[in-house]
Amino acid sequence: MSMPLSPSFSSSFLRAAPRRAAHRIARRPAGASRWCRGLPALALLAACCAAQAQPAEPARPQGRYLTASGNLEVEVAACGTALCGTVTRVLANRSMHRPGQEMKPADTRPALGMQLLSGFRPVQPLASEADPSSAGAQPTQWAGLIHDRETGRQYDALMSVDASGDLVLHGYVGLPMFGRTQVWHRLAAQPASVAASLPGSLPASSPALLPSSPPSSSRSSSSSSSRAQAPSPMPAALLAGSAAAGSTQEQQ
């Protein structure tokens, strides 16, 4: 059996109910505003995660490299529809097959301007079932021929660029599993004026061929003019006469 409420309690409860409801309603916008203020930070965090998830574009092999032996500088550039590597500077002549000895190349042509890499074309990746769009992705490997000056032979080779930007070349005969890998270190690009002034570089510098002294004709003309300007010696008879005149003047 329920007890009846007193009139004073009922009236005070009813008067307090609107205040409690208004207090709850007033608190809700503050919480909602704090949640709204956090939205930009969440959006920025999501954008950063999406940017990190996207793979970086693979580096391209075009550039200037120092060979593994340190003998040559090679410029990799486009030649038609393929990539080729041409020697632009000769630094040394060390043997790659006999360490510590001088190279005696079977290919006796001048190294400067020789094409060591030829016909490198991209190896297109095959589309996988998980990612069918991978067939049109940027290539990360190229196939062509590499020339060995020391043996005078050409080998099949695979070319790629590592994370440091260096050129990785894997030469082989028959199957790629039977071969040897070497790394060519990427060099910083130099202005054309600086590259042309380096010794043993392509194109060859010409200031060393300029004459350091004037030609023989100019030297002969200058020597003849100097001889013409020099005073001629006085004859011996005139010298004797002037001495005798001086002595008679002293006697007088």
Image (cartoon, rainbow, N blue to C red):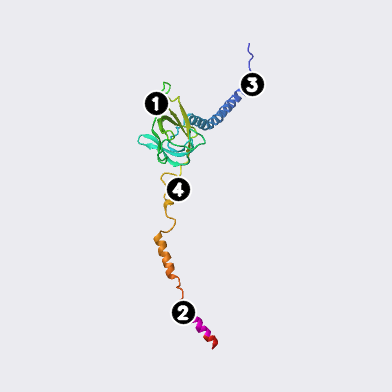
In the image, residue 96 sits, relative to residue 1, either above or below, namely below
Q: Classify mark 4: helix, strand or loop.
A: helix
Which of the two discs, 2 and 4, labels the residue nearer the N terminus? 4
Three-letter code, disc 2: Leu
Quarter of the image with the C terminus is bottom right
In front: mark 2 or mark 1? Answer: 2
Which numbered disc, 2 or 1, marks the residue that appears first in the sequence? Answer: 1
Q: Element type at marker 3?
A: helix
Residue 27 relative to residue 97: left or right? right
Front: mark 2 or 4: 2
Name which residue lies at 42% across and 62% down: 219
Q: Are marks 4 and 1 in contact (CB under 8 Å)?
A: no
Give yes or no for residue 182 being in the magenta stretch. no
Tell me the tag on residue 197: 4
Residue 232 picture location, percent across and down: 45, 73
The residue closer to the viewer here, 60 or 218, is 218
Residue type at the position of mark 3:
Phe
Gap between marks 2 and 3 measured at Cα: 159 Å
Residue assigned mark 1: 135
Above or below: residue 120 compared with residue 204: above
Question: Which region of the structure is painted magenta?
Answer: 241-247
Mark 4–mark 1 Cα distance, whole angstroms, equals: 45 Å
Q: Nearer the viewer, residue 58 or 229?
A: 229
Q: Amino acid at mark 4?
A: Ser
User: Does residue 5 appear to the left or right of 232 in the view shown?
Assistant: right
- The residue where tag 3 is placed is 9
- Per the image, the residue denoted by label 2 is 238
Q: Nearer the viewer, mark 1 or mark 3?
A: 1
Which residue occupies the foreground of this view, 118 or 233?
233
Q: CA distance from mark 4 to mark 3?
A: 104 Å
Where, by quadrant of the figure, is residue 89 drawn?
Answer: top left
Residue drawn 42% across and 67% down?
225
